[in-house]
Image: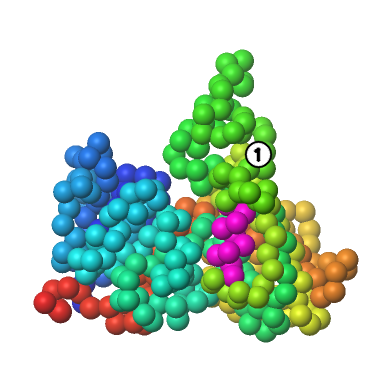
Amino acid sequence: MSYKIAVVGATGNVGREILEILSQRNFPVREVVALASRNSAGKEVSFGEEKILTVQALDDYDFKGTDIALFSPGSAVSKIYAPKAAAAGCVVIDNTSHFRMEKDIPLVVPEVNAAALKDFRKTNIIANPNCSTIQMVVALKPLHAINPIKRVVVSTYQSVSGAGKEGMDELYEQTKGLFVHDSKEPKKFQKRIAFNVIPQIDVYMDDGKTKEEWKMVEETKKILDENIKVSATCVRVPVFVGHSESVNIEFTNPMSIEQVYDALENAEGVMVVDRREAGGYTTPVECVGEDATFVSRVRVDETIPNGINMWVVSDNLRKGAALNAVQIAETLVQQFGLKPALETA
């Protein structure tokens, strides 16, 4: 079996990464279509090492006969076009935040809650979680499975690529400008990002949380367990790619370091790098281009009952977005019997 795949937002950071990962993982592709705004129509993007795709305008595309569409164009665009694609029989895997908290739309990290895909045809839309949520729940799932988690307190250190190409460009231009005494005013971020950290990602909500923090709370509950209490502080840092998280966990029962290591080392999608020596941990630099969620600095928190601290790092453009979306598509094919349109016509 092979599938016709559309990548919507193909000229963006995540769209390009999706195309690369589809090729790297040898997804059974019959045809790949690159879609973006009318302004990007005619541009070229790579699919693997040899194939070049010409970008088509999303406005003009007919999704009938397309098996899977991987969307990463922004919420406003997904709001309009994802339902149109779904109505045409195409399964949409959407990277934006628009559908995540809708009751009938599964929010999926395959290593954590693949079973949520069983009724995917009900809406033909599947939501990809927020990047910071994905890596955290991948690390939490194997621990929660053996010792229920009561509470999580997480502080994030999120790279500028989470804000798209404009965020990466702003960090580059501001950093370069500071060395030549040419100050660049912030445009994408609320304050200067070069040599700085910004404790605000997305807009403020009425209770003082930012929307990014709200996403981590609510998405974790929907994906992992609605009874887990989550407190999040989300911070933008001057790193190009790779999100880091300091995660404090309170378990129901006592939990030894050995039990944590054993659960994580046998978990799908997790890599433990935790040598108690200088440099014996993973940083964003080492995680770029890697598929795993890395866990380091595992230690007991003696200030709370049954407490554990750990450090979690992942490539936010891969596992935090593109890879997770492709893994959802793989799961639909391998576990839930998605048939190509050509075979069901």
Residue drawn at 75 percent across, 76 percent down: 251
In this view, 259 is above or below 313: below
Q: Residue furthest left?
A: 345
In this view, 257 is above or below 152: below
In this view, 188 is above or below 202: above
Q: Which image quarter holds the N terminus?
A: bottom left
Residue drawn at 29 percent across, 61 percent down: 83
Q: Which image quarter holds the C terminus?
A: bottom left
Q: Residue 308 at x, y = what percent?
A: 78, 69
Foreground residue, 271 or 67?
Answer: 67
Q: Is residue 236 left or right of residue 41?
A: right
Dominant SS type (magenta): helix
Q: Would you name the residue on which mark 1 appears?
A: 198
Residue drawn at 46 percent across, 42 percent down: 164
Q: Residue furthest top?
A: 181
Task: Tell whether position 218 is magenta.
Answer: yes
Q: Residues within 10 Å of mark 1 (few under 14, many from 20)?
A: some
Foreground residue, 316 or 118?
Answer: 118
Foreground residue, 232 or 248?
Answer: 232
Residue drawn at 70 percent across, 76 percent down: 149
Q: Which segment is the magenta one? A: 212-221
Q: Residue 124 at x, y = what percent?
A: 31, 70
Q: Is residue 98 left or right of residue 8?
A: right
